[in-house]
């Protein structure tokens, strides 16, 4: 067993290039070899268990290797593995859009398949752009996105990304878009609590909407669409914001003839407590992007869902040149469709959202307790998503110098404690699989707090703290 593990690590070192990873970091530590997973736990080659506290990059929903999804995949692989999706259709795609349609607002009724979140975003952007081209409104070519937003890593989705660390270098490649100062969450003067908590229902003056209003009112003639992650900006630090912002944005975009794109790649499928963030916001966008949780975390699949009005602008004789010339080899892969259908059925059979209502209450209470530590500067949560900012000392207002890489060290130490606390800078977050029990939640939070506090106290000698801005 040990020899095999060695071989995997050595071959990995020699030949593999991992995503979002400075490979040099693996000079001093080995990547962990995960051999299997069951429920909300991952097991490495030495048999050690880890809580999958980030749902395997935000994809897992019902736990790993859920028998119902395994059965559906086994059945499907014997019937139809894959076939091209132009000229052909299949019952696995049609049943999926039927079932998913029942969960979505009626206006979102045209489904375009692809296979990852970035691509679902690319497709939404191209659809919004071509809608106006097809209708002869040639000036509407630009997009608006929020500061700190993340919509994927392909060049188009990067062009509407607002995270300097990932996007600045590629500036010469990005198409011109408008970045708008994001809605406030933590640090908002309208907040009542010391920490952000769940700000989705915050009733405030929404001064933060002003930059958006000003831009749209002056430039709507050149703007095709505004794209947002509804209710919570995830990669940007799990920053929640009021649903009222989205309602105001919807009213204004509708009035000015600008499309609204909801990127629910991260928030879809129960993550925030409702099936989709749009349910809680009570807002219907013109385009909706889904991926990550769609197959319960088993296979890649994505959907861009459009309104009939958008679809109609492409519907004409072939030589009108209005066709949407876009597609991918694995469009509507039947195996992925079967997994997605099985996952949707589980939401009903296992009353997943009702259980999330209970487990997220325990999660919320547990997270609030983190405030007792002086190393915690902000606490925020929404459904089973949570985050805390880790600092040197809240009372003294000092953060860790970034060269200390506190978040990274917490991640390393969390693995030894049987957890996966992947950092976003010095923000530590949880994106729990919806299958966690209350007991899992308590154990995860107890261990997390211990890892954070122990790591932070071990770093106290790490030089002057840089000023911490709340
Ligand atoms: C992860 C993510 C994406 C990109 O999805 P990939 O499948 O990783 O390409 C896009 N938008 C949001 C909001 C995401 O969280």
Image (cartoon, helix red, strand yellow):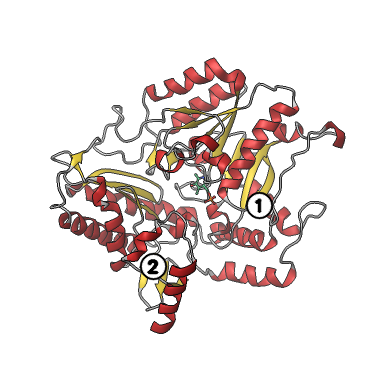
Question: Which residue in the protein does label 1 denote?
Answer: 99
**Residue 1 can be seen, yes or no:** no
Q: Position of residue 437 (x, y in %)?
A: 38, 62
Q: Position of residue 181 (x, y in %)?
A: 41, 28
Q: Secondary structure at mark 1?
A: helix
Query: Quick one: label 1 or label 2, which is nearer the N terminus?
Result: 2
Q: Position of residue 417 (x, y in %)?
A: 28, 67
In the image, what residue occupies the spot 46% across and 50% down?
271
The answer to which of 196 and 360 lies nearer the viewer is 196
Q: Position of residue 377 (x, y in %)?
A: 23, 43
Question: Which residue in the protein does label 2 denote?
Answer: 31
320 to the left or right of 461: right
196 to the left or right of 248: left
**Label 2 beta carbon within 8 A of ligand 1:** no
Q: Is residue 219 above or below residue 281?
A: above
The answer to which of 13 and 361 lies nearer the viewer is 13
Q: CA distance from mark 1 to mark 2?
A: 40 Å
The answer to which of 353 and 157 lies nearer the viewer is 157
Q: Is residue 203 above or below residue 428?
A: above
In the rendered structure, find residue 377 and report the number of the disc placed on it: none
The answer to which of 425 and 420 lies nearer the viewer is 425
Quadrant of the rendering where the C terminus is positioned? top left
253 to the left or right of 274: right
> For mark 2, does the 10 Å Cα neighbourhood hold few (<14), some (14 to 19), or many (20 or more) residues?
few
């Amino acid at each position: 067993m040990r020899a095999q593990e060695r071989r995997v690590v050595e071959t990995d070192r020699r030949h593999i290039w991992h995503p979002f990873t400075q490979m040099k970091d693996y000079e001093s530590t080995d990547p962990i070899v995960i051999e299997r997973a069951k429920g909300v736990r991952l097991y490495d080659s030495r048999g050690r268990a880890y809580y999958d506290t980030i749902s395997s990059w935000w994809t897992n929903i019902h736990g790993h290797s859920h028998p119902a999804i395994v059965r559906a995949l086994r059945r499907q692989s014997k019937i139809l593995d894959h076939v091209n999706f132009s000229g052909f259709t299949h019952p696995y795609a049609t049943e999926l859009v039927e079932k998913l349609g029942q969960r979505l607002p009626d206006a979102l009724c045209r489904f375009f398949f692809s296979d990852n979140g970035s691509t679902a975003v690319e497709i939404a952007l191209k659809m919004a752009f071509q809608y106006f081209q097809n209708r002869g409104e040639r000036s509407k070519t630009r997009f608006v996105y929020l500061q700190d937003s993340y919509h994927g890593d392909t060049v188009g989705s990067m062009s509407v990304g607002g995270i300097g660390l990932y996007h600045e270098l590629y500036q010469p490649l990005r198409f011109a878009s408008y970045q708008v100062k994001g809605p406030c969450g933590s640090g908002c003067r309208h907040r009542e609590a010391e920490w952000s908590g769940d700000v989705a229902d915050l009733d405030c003056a929404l001064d933060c909407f002003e930059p958006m209003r000003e831009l749209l009112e002056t430039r709507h003639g050149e703007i095709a669409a505004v794209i947002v992650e509804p209710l919570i900006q995830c990669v940007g630090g799990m920053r929640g914001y009021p649903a009222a912002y989205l309602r105001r944005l919807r009213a204004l975009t509708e009035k000015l003839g600008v499309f609204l794109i909801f990127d629910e790649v991260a928030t879809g499928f129960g993550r925030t407590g409702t099936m989709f963030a749009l349910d809680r916001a009570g807002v219907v966008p013109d385009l909706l992007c889904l991926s990550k949780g769609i197959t319960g975390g088993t296979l890649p699949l994505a959907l861009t869902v459009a309104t009939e009005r958008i679809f109609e602008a492409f519907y004409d004789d072939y030589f009108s040149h209005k066709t949407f010339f876009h597609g991918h080899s694995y469009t509507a892969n039947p195996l992925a469709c079967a997994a997605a259908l099985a996952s949707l059925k589980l939401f009903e059979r296992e009353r997943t959202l009702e259980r999330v209502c209970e487990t997220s209450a325990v999660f919320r209470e547990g997270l609030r307790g983190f405030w007792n530590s002086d190393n915690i500067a902000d606490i925020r949560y929404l459904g089973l998503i949570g985050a805390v900012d880790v600092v040197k000392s809240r009372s003294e207002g000092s953060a860790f110098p970034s060269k200390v890489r506190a978040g990274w060290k917490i991640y390393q130490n969390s693995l030894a404690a049987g957890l996966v606390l992947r950092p976003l800078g010095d923000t530590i977050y949880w994106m729990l699989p919806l299958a966690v029990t209350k007991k899992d939640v308590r154990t995860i939070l107890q261990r997390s707090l211990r890892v954070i506090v122990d790591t932070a106290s071990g770093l106290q000698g790490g030089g002057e703290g840089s000023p911490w801005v709340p």
